Amino acid sequence: MRYCDSPYSFQRRCARRVFVGNPEEGGVVMGGEHSVVMQSMLTCDTMDTEECVRQTLDLVAVGCQMVRITAPTVKDAANLRNIVEVLRSRDCHVPIVADIHFKPEAAMEAAKWVEVIRINPGNYADSKKFAIKEYNDEQYAAELARIEERFAPLVQLCKQLGRAIRIGTNHGSLSDRIMNRFGDTPLGMVESALEFARIARKHDYHNFKFSMKSSNPKVMIECYRLLAARLEQEGPDWNYPLHLGVTEAGEGEDGRIKSAIGIGSLLCDGLGDTIRVSLTEDSPREIEVCRDLLEQIPLLTRKLSTLPAIPVSFDPFSYERHFTEEVEIAAGVRCGNAQTVRVVVPRPVYEKVAPKLGAKTDVKPEAIYEELKLIEVDPLEDFTLSPGVMVAVRDGVDLPTITAYRLLASRLKILGFRNPILLKDCLEIPSEPLESKVALLRASVVVGALLADGIGDAILIRGEPGAGASLRLAYNILQAVGCRSFKTDYVACPSCGRTLFNLQTVTARIKARTQHLKGVKIAIMGCIVNGPGEMADADFGYVGGAPGKINLYVGKTPIKFNIAESEAVDRLVDLIREHGKWVEPAEAEVS
């Protein structure tokens, strides 16, 4: 299967055009030759018309091109009419997306008033009770007929009114039916979406796009690649647009890094027609990151005049680390094979940061670039390697960095060399220092994409001019892509009208109590929509259960219910302690 034209040469996927509203009156066109569309979401109660209007105008002012608003009930969906009328009276014609999960009736109401209906196949007209049941083919067909009975009216209404639909699968909310047949897998996510697409096509409706969201960037990348490949297999008229996003990415550097890895790597492969960066921050900040990220893609890619006739070294649809031999890169530090991915720094960085590091610190240089036993090569030229040395792409090679390292890994596999690979975030140090926010995005896209391919045994960050910042960025990328765990990992949703507590405040409160817990993953979810599923690989979950009430989870299993919000963080700490994961901050500092 093929997910893009070439993993070595940039060529944007040719998606069919999907119209959202009237382009002459502020609407947008997704796909075709049109630019990637930037999207965000409101964080307020949908019944608060004035606040919804204010937040929408704030988003439009910073360049947001589509605005999503949750509509959990028919009452909320009906109020979209008031919101849209006020916006249009103020000469704001940005397309509005209604976010629907559990209630088809709400979708039918929302379609009367807004340009796009987002439905989640795992929640729409389906059940999710984490029940284990084997479906024979007849039972499965009956389930699909039941779903079509619920979904087809929305398709017909959208076709009649000229609305668009987003078929948005979430890793955290696959139905029991999909889970039991395909498991919690990228294949399950893709099949879930295709089932709904086939219903739409059966009614000759094509004005829709797909999304495949996960809080894990590697899972998200695999899902979109598999979807793109499956759509190509289905036929040339299945080239529907793709909306990209890493859901529950979190806040600050961590949220930006996760989003850049997932969204950026796919954009570099030519996939993606709309994007959203989901941050646990004020929504306008998402658009700034969207714009900054989109600006980097032309600088990190290029269409090659001649395509290398070399198969890639990795399976694009299933992660497996590139196999290499193990070598020593510094005293007591080994790299390659089953060793963790190491952090290498240039000598000037080492000289600046080393004197400030404590003996027990986790964020530290593990080797000095200039002291490595290293051979640097041009992957387009012939080369030979001896065992016991690392290999990297030579500076100045006239190739995009991702392309160069994919070619290097492929050449190594063909030639039978197993030398560990040192990844660089750039093949030419910028002549002028980059802004830190730009350096962060570029390094995350390049290094994160390659690590998600299974390529790389050590990384070297040189685009970030700050010594300490470059070291921290290296470790944060490794944590975000799932290669190392040196600090607490947080999965935090970005807030919306369904959220039952202030996510930014609560996230800060939880971090203040738990950020010293190394290797513990905590999910912070404003409501139950994606909670249990997205928390499947988290150790603990803090989920809004009702206004002012919190439910606590271990993995995806609810343990404690209806805890007063004022006590919930303390009870979360107690739960972590009960499961043997708690250490006191002072102990963590010296461990």
Image (cartoon, rainbow, N blue to C red):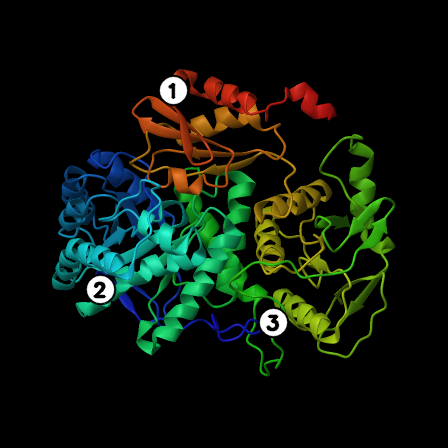
Horizontal side, residue 90 vs residue 214: left or right: left
Q: What's the residue at 53%, 72% (across, down)?
A: 10
Q: What's the residue at 14%, 42% (across, down)?
A: 78
92, above or below 548, in the image: below
300, above or below 462, in the image: below
Horizontal side, residue 229 vs residue 472: left or right: left
Observer-nearest residue: 37 or 172?
172
- For the residues marked 3 and 1, what is the alpha-carbon distance in whole angstroms? 50 Å
Q: Nearer the viewer, mark 2 or mark 1?
A: 2
Mark sitting on residue 591? none
Which residue is under mark 1? 565
- Label 1: how many Cα within 10 Å (few below 14, some 14–19, many 20+): some
Which residue is under mark 3? 312
Q: Earlier in the sequence, mark 3 or mark 1?
A: 3
Observer-nearest residue: 382 or 223?
223
Image quadrant assignment for residue 352? top right
Q: In terms of secondary structure, where does tag 2 sit?
A: helix
Observer-nearest residue: 156 or 274?
156
- For the residues marked 2 and 3, what is the alpha-carbon distance in whole angstroms? 35 Å
Observer-nearest residue: 520 or 294?
520
Q: In terms of secondary structure, where does tag 1 sit?
A: helix
Q: Earlier in the sequence, mark 2 or mark 3?
A: 2
Mark sitting on residue 200? 2
Image quadrant assignment for residue 375? bottom right
- For the residues marked 2 and 1, what is the alpha-carbon distance in whole angstroms? 42 Å
- Label 3: how many Cα within 10 Å (few below 14, some 14–19, many 20+): some
Q: Please, what is the three-letter code of the amino acid marked with disc 2? A: Ala
Q: Please, what is the three-letter code of the amino acid marked with disc 1? A: Glu
The percent coordinates of residue 426 (x first, y second) are: 67, 60
